[in-house]
Amino acid sequence: MALTSDHNGLFIQGMTDPGELRGFLESRFSQAEIQSLYAVRLEEAKSMARAEKIAPLRAFWKLMDRAFGGKSQALQCGRGCAHCCYTGVAATQLEWDGILDNAREKGLDLHKILERSRRTIDRVRDAVKSGKDLDAAAWHRLVVNQPCPFLQEDQSCAVYEDRPLDCRLVVAYRGKCSSKNLEHAQRGVVPEEAVASTVVARLQYEATPKMKRRKFDGSQKVHLLHRWLVAWEDKNRGKR
Protein backbone atom coordinates (compact mmCIF):
# COMPACT_ATOMS: atom_id res chain seq x y z
CA MET A 1 0.00 0.00 0.00
CA ALA A 2 1.42 3.39 -0.99
CA LEU A 3 2.30 5.79 1.77
CA THR A 4 0.25 8.98 1.73
CA SER A 5 0.93 12.43 3.11
CA ASP A 6 -0.56 15.91 2.83
CA HIS A 7 0.67 18.43 0.26
CA ASN A 8 3.45 19.47 2.63
CA GLY A 9 4.49 15.88 3.27
CA LEU A 10 3.85 16.38 6.96
CA PHE A 11 1.80 13.36 7.92
CA ILE A 12 0.57 9.95 6.98
CA GLN A 13 -3.12 9.54 7.69
CA GLY A 14 -4.11 6.60 9.83
CA MET A 15 -0.69 4.96 9.88
CA THR A 16 -0.11 2.82 12.96
CA ASP A 17 2.59 0.39 11.76
CA PRO A 18 6.02 1.39 13.20
CA GLY A 19 7.71 -0.20 10.20
CA GLU A 20 5.78 2.05 7.82
CA LEU A 21 6.61 5.08 9.91
CA ARG A 22 10.31 4.20 9.90
CA GLY A 23 10.23 3.73 6.14
CA PHE A 24 8.46 7.04 5.62
CA LEU A 25 10.93 8.91 7.82
CA GLU A 26 13.86 7.30 6.06
CA SER A 27 12.40 8.47 2.75
CA ARG A 28 12.27 12.04 4.04
CA PHE A 29 15.59 12.20 5.89
CA SER A 30 18.93 10.71 4.90
CA GLN A 31 20.74 8.27 7.16
CA ALA A 32 23.42 10.91 7.68
CA GLU A 33 20.79 13.43 8.86
CA ILE A 34 19.18 10.88 11.17
CA GLN A 35 22.49 9.78 12.70
CA SER A 36 23.62 13.37 13.19
CA LEU A 37 20.33 14.36 14.83
CA TYR A 38 20.51 11.32 17.13
CA ALA A 39 23.95 12.37 18.41
CA VAL A 40 22.90 16.01 18.80
CA ARG A 41 19.67 15.30 20.68
CA LEU A 42 21.35 12.76 22.95
CA GLU A 43 24.03 15.23 24.00
CA GLU A 44 21.50 18.07 24.32
CA ALA A 45 19.37 15.95 26.65
CA LYS A 46 22.32 15.09 28.87
CA SER A 47 23.56 18.68 28.90
CA MET A 48 20.11 20.04 29.78
CA ALA A 49 19.73 17.41 32.50
CA ARG A 50 22.97 18.55 34.14
CA ALA A 51 22.12 22.23 33.83
CA GLU A 52 18.57 21.92 35.15
CA LYS A 53 19.28 19.08 37.57
CA ILE A 54 16.57 16.89 36.09
CA ALA A 55 16.54 13.34 34.72
CA PRO A 56 18.01 13.00 31.20
CA LEU A 57 14.76 11.47 29.95
CA ARG A 58 12.72 14.41 31.26
CA ALA A 59 15.16 16.73 29.49
CA PHE A 60 14.68 14.79 26.26
CA TRP A 61 10.91 15.10 26.60
CA LYS A 62 11.40 18.87 26.74
CA LEU A 63 13.37 18.68 23.50
CA MET A 64 10.59 16.63 21.90
CA ASP A 65 7.98 19.17 23.02
CA ARG A 66 10.09 21.93 21.52
CA ALA A 67 10.35 20.09 18.20
CA PHE A 68 6.61 19.53 17.94
CA GLY A 69 6.01 23.09 19.15
CA GLY A 70 7.47 24.35 15.91
CA LYS A 71 4.41 22.86 14.18
CA SER A 72 1.95 24.07 16.81
CA GLN A 73 -0.08 26.32 14.51
CA ALA A 74 -1.90 23.28 13.16
CA LEU A 75 -1.80 21.14 16.28
CA GLN A 76 -5.31 20.20 17.42
CA CYS A 77 -4.69 17.94 20.42
CA GLY A 78 -5.76 19.52 23.71
CA ARG A 79 -6.70 18.75 27.29
CA GLY A 80 -9.67 16.43 27.35
CA CYS A 81 -9.10 15.12 23.81
CA ALA A 82 -8.44 11.51 24.74
CA HIS A 83 -9.44 9.43 21.74
CA CYS A 84 -5.88 8.07 21.41
CA CYS A 85 -5.87 7.03 25.09
CA TYR A 86 -8.04 3.97 24.42
CA THR A 87 -5.36 1.65 23.12
CA GLY A 88 -2.36 -0.18 24.48
CA VAL A 89 0.55 2.06 25.44
CA ALA A 90 4.01 0.49 25.68
CA ALA A 91 6.99 1.88 27.57
CA THR A 92 10.59 1.02 28.32
CA GLN A 93 11.88 0.54 31.86
CA LEU A 94 13.31 4.09 31.78
CA GLU A 95 9.99 5.57 30.69
CA TRP A 96 8.18 3.60 33.38
CA ASP A 97 10.64 4.87 36.00
CA GLY A 98 9.88 8.41 34.81
CA ILE A 99 6.15 7.78 35.22
CA LEU A 100 6.75 6.49 38.76
CA ASP A 101 8.75 9.63 39.58
CA ASN A 102 5.89 11.75 38.25
CA ALA A 103 3.39 9.82 40.35
CA ARG A 104 5.50 10.29 43.49
CA GLU A 105 5.91 14.01 42.85
CA LYS A 106 2.15 14.46 42.45
CA GLY A 107 1.20 12.11 45.27
CA LEU A 108 -0.79 9.85 42.96
CA ASP A 109 -2.18 6.70 44.55
CA LEU A 110 -1.19 3.91 42.17
CA HIS A 111 -3.39 1.49 44.09
CA LYS A 112 -6.43 3.56 43.07
CA ILE A 113 -5.19 3.68 39.49
CA LEU A 114 -4.86 -0.09 39.53
CA GLU A 115 -8.38 -0.58 40.87
CA ARG A 116 -9.80 1.77 38.25
CA SER A 117 -8.35 -0.49 35.54
CA ARG A 118 -8.77 -3.76 37.40
CA ARG A 119 -10.47 -5.61 34.55
CA THR A 120 -7.67 -5.05 32.05
CA ILE A 121 -4.98 -5.29 34.73
CA ASP A 122 -6.22 -8.77 35.67
CA ARG A 123 -6.44 -9.72 31.99
CA VAL A 124 -2.78 -8.83 31.55
CA ARG A 125 -1.85 -10.52 34.83
CA ASP A 126 -3.47 -13.77 33.64
CA ALA A 127 -1.52 -13.56 30.39
CA VAL A 128 1.74 -13.06 32.31
CA LYS A 129 0.95 -16.02 34.57
CA SER A 130 0.19 -18.23 31.59
CA GLY A 131 3.78 -17.92 30.44
CA LYS A 132 2.67 -17.67 26.82
CA ASP A 133 5.07 -15.91 24.47
CA LEU A 134 2.61 -13.35 23.09
CA ASP A 135 3.58 -10.99 20.30
CA ALA A 136 3.03 -7.23 20.56
CA ALA A 137 -0.30 -7.38 18.74
CA ALA A 138 -1.65 -10.01 21.12
CA TRP A 139 -0.67 -7.95 24.16
CA HIS A 140 -2.39 -4.89 22.70
CA ARG A 141 -5.57 -6.85 22.00
CA LEU A 142 -5.86 -7.50 25.75
CA VAL A 143 -6.45 -3.80 26.42
CA VAL A 144 -7.73 -2.33 23.14
CA ASN A 145 -10.69 0.06 23.42
CA GLN A 146 -10.10 0.35 27.16
CA PRO A 147 -8.90 3.60 28.76
CA CYS A 148 -5.26 3.95 29.72
CA PRO A 149 -4.88 3.41 33.49
CA PHE A 150 -3.55 6.97 33.79
CA LEU A 151 -6.52 8.56 32.00
CA GLN A 152 -8.48 10.57 34.56
CA GLU A 153 -12.22 11.21 34.78
CA ASP A 154 -11.84 14.60 33.09
CA GLN A 155 -10.13 12.82 30.18
CA SER A 156 -6.71 14.28 31.01
CA CYS A 157 -3.49 12.33 31.58
CA ALA A 158 -2.39 12.02 35.20
CA VAL A 159 1.30 11.82 34.20
CA TYR A 160 1.20 13.93 31.05
CA GLU A 161 4.62 15.56 31.46
CA ASP A 162 6.27 12.14 31.56
CA ARG A 163 4.02 10.25 29.16
CA PRO A 164 6.00 7.70 27.11
CA LEU A 165 7.10 7.97 23.51
CA ASP A 166 4.18 5.82 22.38
CA CYS A 167 1.86 8.68 23.36
CA ARG A 168 4.07 11.45 22.00
CA LEU A 169 4.11 9.99 18.50
CA VAL A 170 0.34 10.16 18.08
CA VAL A 171 -0.47 13.73 17.09
CA ALA A 172 -3.53 15.29 15.43
CA TYR A 173 -2.62 18.06 13.04
CA ARG A 174 -5.50 18.08 10.58
CA GLY A 175 -8.38 18.23 13.03
CA LYS A 176 -9.76 16.77 16.22
CA CYS A 177 -10.06 12.99 16.30
CA SER A 178 -13.63 11.83 15.79
CA SER A 179 -13.31 8.26 17.02
CA LYS A 180 -11.02 5.90 18.91
CA ASN A 181 -9.70 4.29 15.72
CA LEU A 182 -6.86 6.83 15.40
CA GLU A 183 -7.69 7.51 11.77
CA HIS A 184 -6.62 11.11 12.32
CA ALA A 185 -3.33 10.24 13.99
CA GLN A 186 -0.43 11.64 12.04
CA ARG A 187 3.24 10.80 12.18
CA GLY A 188 6.32 11.69 10.20
CA VAL A 189 6.01 15.33 11.24
CA VAL A 190 9.43 16.07 12.74
CA PRO A 191 12.78 14.29 12.26
CA GLU A 192 13.00 13.67 16.02
CA GLU A 193 10.49 10.87 15.45
CA ALA A 194 13.19 9.00 13.55
CA VAL A 195 15.65 9.08 16.45
CA ALA A 196 13.53 9.31 19.61
CA SER A 197 13.30 5.59 20.39
CA THR A 198 17.07 5.18 19.96
CA VAL A 199 17.79 8.18 22.20
CA VAL A 200 15.51 6.74 24.90
CA ALA A 201 17.19 3.34 24.54
CA ARG A 202 20.64 4.92 24.85
CA LEU A 203 19.66 6.89 27.95
CA GLN A 204 18.40 3.67 29.53
CA TYR A 205 21.60 1.87 28.54
CA GLU A 206 23.73 4.57 30.16
CA ALA A 207 21.59 4.48 33.31
CA THR A 208 22.15 0.72 33.64
CA PRO A 209 25.05 -0.36 35.91
CA LYS A 210 28.02 -1.34 33.73
CA MET A 211 28.09 -4.89 35.10
CA LYS A 212 24.53 -5.43 33.84
CA ARG A 213 24.95 -3.86 30.41
CA ARG A 214 24.88 -5.84 27.22
CA LYS A 215 26.14 -4.54 23.90
CA PHE A 216 23.99 -1.58 22.86
CA ASP A 217 21.86 -2.48 19.84
CA GLY A 218 19.76 0.68 19.63
CA SER A 219 16.68 -0.71 21.34
CA GLN A 220 15.25 -1.67 24.72
CA LYS A 221 12.40 -3.96 25.74
CA VAL A 222 8.97 -2.40 26.03
CA HIS A 223 5.91 -3.58 27.94
CA LEU A 224 2.34 -2.32 28.18
CA LEU A 225 1.74 0.13 31.01
CA HIS A 226 -0.69 -2.44 32.38
CA ARG A 227 2.14 -4.97 32.60
CA TRP A 228 4.40 -2.51 34.41
CA LEU A 229 1.54 -1.86 36.83
CA VAL A 230 1.11 -5.59 37.44
CA ALA A 231 4.81 -5.84 38.33
CA TRP A 232 4.55 -2.76 40.56
CA GLU A 233 1.51 -4.18 42.37
CA ASP A 234 3.23 -7.50 42.97
CA LYS A 235 6.30 -5.73 44.35
CA ASN A 236 4.29 -3.43 46.61
CA ARG A 237 1.56 -5.80 47.69
CA GLY A 238 0.69 -5.22 51.35
CA LYS A 239 2.67 -1.97 51.65
CA ARG A 240 -0.31 0.38 51.89
Image (cartoon, rainbow, N blue to C red):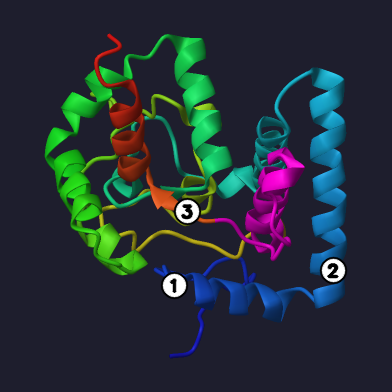
Viewer-side label of 3, 1: 3
Mark 2 or mark 1, which has the lower sequence index?
1
Callout 3 touching callout 1 (CB < 8 Å): no
**10 Å neighbourhood of mark 2: few (<14), some, or many (≥20)?**
few
Crowding at mark 3 (Cα within 10 Å: few <14, some 14-19, many 20+): some
Residue at the extreme front: 211
Q: Which residue is mark 3?
A: 222
Q: Amino acid at mark 1?
A: Asp
Q: Which sits in the foreground, 57 or 31?
A: 57
The residue under the point 53% across, 32% down is: 97
Q: Is residue 179 above or below residue 155?
A: below
- State whether residue 106 is above or below residue 223: above
Point 28% across, 25% down: residue = 152
Q: Amino acid at mark 3?
A: Val
User: Does the magenta portion include 194?
Assistant: yes
**Residue type beneath disc 2:** Glu
> On the picture, is 238 further left or further right than 72?
left
Q: Residue at x 51, y 83 (%)?
A: 3
Q: Main secondary structure of the magenta part?
A: helix
Magenta stretch: includes residue 235:
no
